[in-house]
Image: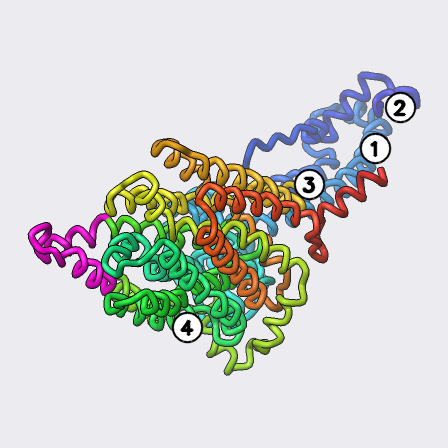
Amino acid sequence: QRRDTLLLSGHSMEDLDRAARESGREKFRREMTVAFLPVFILEEKLVLKTQSLFGSSKNSGSDMDPREAKRCGGAARDVEGGNRSIFRRTRSALDSSIHSIRNLDTSLHSLTGSFRESLSPMDKSSAPTSRRRNRKSLSDAESMQLSNEESSRSGNSDFGDGSSNASSDMYVPSHDSKFKGRYHVRVDRSQHDKAVEIRLCQMKRPHMRAFHASWISFFAAFFLWFAVTPLLGEIKDTLTLSKEQIWTSSLCGTAGTILMRLILGPLCDKFGARLCMASILLVSAIPCAMTGLVESAEGLYIARSFIGIAGASFVACQYWTSSMFTREVAGTANALVAGWGNLGGGVTQIVMGSVVFPILKHIFGGDSNEKSAEQAWRTSFVIPSFFAVIVAIVIISYCDDSPKGDYRARVRAQEISIESPCSSLSAGCTNWNAWALMFQYACCFGVEVTLTNGAAFYFKERFGQSTESAAAIASVFGAMNLFARGLGGHGSDLYNTRYGMRGRLGWQFVTLVIQGGMIMLFGFARSLSGAIVALIFTSIMVQSAEGSTFGIVPYVSRRYTGGIVGFVGAGGNVGGVMFAAIFRSFPDEKAMYIMGAAAIASAFLSFTIKIKGHSSFATWLHYYQSQ
């Protein structure tokens, strides 16, 4: 187009070509091919290209004859004027590109730091090599700036000063944190240094050590709580108890947890989850060890009521993980620790009923001693008590309450304020969402408590299994906690990313409906194999519903987390008491039918839950009606 314009002004084509060659037209190339180079190399090439463009307009080293140069001078000046106009437009475009690239380079620093953390040692040693090799083409000032950036990312800067480097590094603690190095997981400082990821193979302080300590301590608590259940058949024979008395003892063991769960939530708000968890383990270990001293049904009721204190550890467990992980991953984290902790209810069936009891029975004389079975079950309760005491000592000594340090130390330093236990508890009692979730949790965790208490006794009485065999079969129900509760929490988080809160509520509805149907199938099973298969699928859906419930709980109230967790958690034990009373009064088949129908009915409460700032079924339906 420029040639055509100059040609129309009276210049010949030959003159135009010669003038273009002499004005350095060959230096003015439009090609700028950059194939996957680092950002700083791209910026350098753009700068050099700009410099070459601005230095190309003068006609130097001409080989033309003076007459020809004079004849082409007018054309050359016109070409040079056209080039200047193009240079100005090109410079403006290049300046804008360089500004965008520098912004991109700044945003990539944080991604580069995260990538370097994920490299293996060999990759880390080789990663800077190419960067040092490419730095040879940079100026001294640019090399010095690059060195400063690399040293800041490698951890040589002061992370507590709130600098711009610290704000772009997701591994850096806040200035008021107890930990002054670097976290071992990525955190969100806007949520008080809570972790945004879960690294299961780590046990570094504070996040992942608290994660593993919470489920291990909860596992020990469940081991205490249900240590009696696989031996109820032997206890029944020794103390000559009836079926109603056995179910009454299970009811007492569940009811003893309700009050403690209501109290423990506000106590976690005041003292932190770590000390509350350790206290629960130490207190409940004493009545568990003394269970072997009971001589009547009343003594068994009292012992199991005090052992039920261990069930309140669930509140501390959920509070602990909610304090360590952001709300976006809290559903998965809460479900994993609760599921693996609940696994203690299945492990205790095998350990106490199929391992410890037979070994002690053999030690006390086996079949040659008529009292060997009685002596074995009375002695076996020392083992879970000892395990719980060891776990309590470890979490007190080597774990933390929160990502920024010990809870009480931060309170004394006035870094955080504590809420009144009464106000925390009243927050749960006056919130409809908490009531709906409490009833739903009563229909899933209450089912788990009831079946864990009665499964071994159920298989022994209905299918004629021995104590060891019935305990092994009943352990299948608790074994599903290894993955099922985590599956429920992960599903809740997954649907939350796609559909928001209504995704969580929809997943909650589905799991509860399927759970109710599976409970009914389990109650109607006539063969041992059919009952075992139905028990497995019932367990999977029960645990999934529990994980889904506590994927919603952290959103109910950010300020009174402990009170809400305690209130909803207490609902699970209320359900256990209700269902134990039903099994005490009705035949097993009818009791299973009632329990399944209650779970299906509770699912419809998901349509009534409305959490401020989040979508719900009501807003969803209103939107489509308006459309």
Instruction: Label 1: state its secondary structure.
Output: helix
Q: Earlier in the sequence, mark 4 or mark 3?
A: 3
* Residue picked out by circle 1: 82
Say which of 87 and 206 sits in front.
Answer: 206
Circle 3 Cα neighbour tier, 10 Å, few/some/many (<14 / 14–19 / ≥20) = some
Residue with the mark numbered 2: 5
Task: Give the Cα separation between the discs numbered 1 and 2.
Answer: 10 Å
Residue 279 place in picture, x, y as percent: 38, 73
Chief secondary structure of the magenta portion: helix
Name the foreground residue: 539 vs 229: 229
Gap between marks 4 and 1 measured at Cα: 79 Å
Inspect the image, locate mark 1, and give the three-letter code of the amino acid beneath it.
Gly
Magenta residues span 354-383
**Where residue 41 sits in the image (x, y, percent)?**
56, 42
In this rendering, the label closer to the viewer, 4 or 2: 4
Residue at 56 percent of width and 76 percent of height: 421
Q: Earlier in the sequence, mark 4 or mark 1?
A: 1
The residue carrying mark 4 is 275
Q: How is the image coloured?
A: rainbow
> Pointer 3: what residue?
50
Relative to residue 368, is residue 539 depicted above or below?
A: above
Q: Nearer the viewer, mark 4 or mark 3?
A: 4
